[in-house]
Image (cartoon, helix red, strand yellow):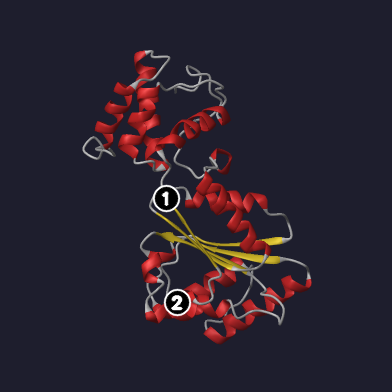
């Protein structure tokens, strides 16, 4: 709707986790490097952060950086019983089996992982929204998958991605066997106020606009109402652009962000 008016090839503030639009703040750059290291070393990594901080976009960027020598095993909805979890894992590994027994599924998964090893392929399992795993027994199945190793190395890399509260959950006594297997931890916080301008400039540039569209006061307002969370920044900026387009504004000021914040119900949530 507003792309032509603002000289854009794409929507710069979409909510989809498009890795082209991943702004590498200091924290996001370090997180991506740790994810790549975990894959390279076949380690287990836990990546946490609040809703909308860019965790899923980071995993998409990780996937895009891997070559054909990696098998991506994505589990996006881990709200599964132990047997359901193993069946989903088997399906993601393209394992054709009718067995419902735990032992049979584990054996089939192990055989495929070892076959990948012999062919020089590294399985990379990414479990998103790991805080939604409902059963202690399912966490135990996740841990058992990390038993697939040789004397000198693991046979797969495991990326656990969850919301902030999972940092406390994984420290519970019942999850200590899994926690002790995790070799890397990283937590992503919000963008700082100083990073907002770079974030907005970067996304506008990727979308095809070389110059800034928001005034300084608008950028400050973006931080006030978003708290630096990328998803909220995107929602505010997108609505501000829609309003600006409707009013024929070629530069978006603070009032456009204020209006967007009211529409989203964020006007009572301010970061001072």
Q: Residue at x 64, y 79 (%)?
A: 148
Q: Residue at x 50, y 79 (%)?
A: 141
Question: In which quarter of the view is residue 117 placed?
Answer: bottom right
Vertical comparison of 179 with 75: above or below: below
Q: Which residue is mark 2?
A: 138
> Quadrant where the C terminus lies?
top left
Counting residues from the N terminus, which is met first, the one under dot 1 or under dot 2?
Answer: 2
Residue 247 at x, y = what percent? 34, 14
Q: Residue at x 64, y 62 (%)?
A: 39
Mark 1: which secondary structure? loop
Q: Report the residue that reaches farthest toward the left.
A: 268
Residue 131 visible: yes
| Residue 38 appears left or right of 46 | right
> Quadrant where the N terminus lies?
top left
Q: Which residue is mark 1?
A: 189
| Residue 83 appears left or right of 38 | left
Classify mark 2: residues with Cα within 10 Å, few (<14), some (14-19) or many (20+).
many
């Amino acid at each position: 709707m507003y792309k032509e008016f603002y000289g854009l090839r794409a929507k710069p503030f979409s909510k989809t986790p498009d890795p082209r639009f991943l702004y590498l703040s200091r924290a996001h750059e370090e997180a991506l490097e740790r994810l790549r290291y975990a894959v390279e070393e076949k380690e287990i990594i836990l990546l946490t952060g609040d809703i909308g901080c860019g965790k899923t976009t980071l995993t998409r960027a990780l996937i895009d950086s891997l070559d054909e020598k990696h098998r991506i095993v994505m589990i996006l909805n881990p709200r599964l019983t132990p047997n359901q979890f193993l069946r989903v894992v088997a399906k993601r590994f393209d394992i054709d089996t009718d067995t419902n027994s735990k032992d049979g599924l584990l054996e089939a998964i192990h055989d495929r992982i070892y076959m990948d090893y012999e062919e020089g392929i590294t399985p990379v399992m990414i479990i998103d929204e790991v805080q939604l795993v409902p059963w202690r027994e399912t966490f135990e199945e996740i841990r058992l998958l990390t038993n697939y190793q040789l004397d000198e190395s693991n046979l797969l890399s495991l990326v656990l991605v969850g919301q902030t509260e999972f940092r406390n959950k994984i420290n519970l006594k019942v999850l200590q066997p899994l926690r002790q297997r995790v070799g890397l931890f990283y937590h992503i916080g919000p963008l700082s106020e100083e990073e907002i301008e770079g974030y907005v400039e970067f996304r506008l540039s990727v979308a095809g606009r070389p110059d800034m569209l928001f005034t300084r006061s608008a950028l400050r307002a973006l931080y006030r109402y978003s708290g630096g969370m990328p998803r909220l920044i995107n929602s505010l900026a997108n609505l501000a652009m829609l309003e600006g387009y409707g009013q024929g504004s070629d530069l978006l000021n603070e009032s456009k962000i204020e209006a967007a914040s009211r529409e989203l119900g964020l006007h009572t949530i301010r970061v001072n």
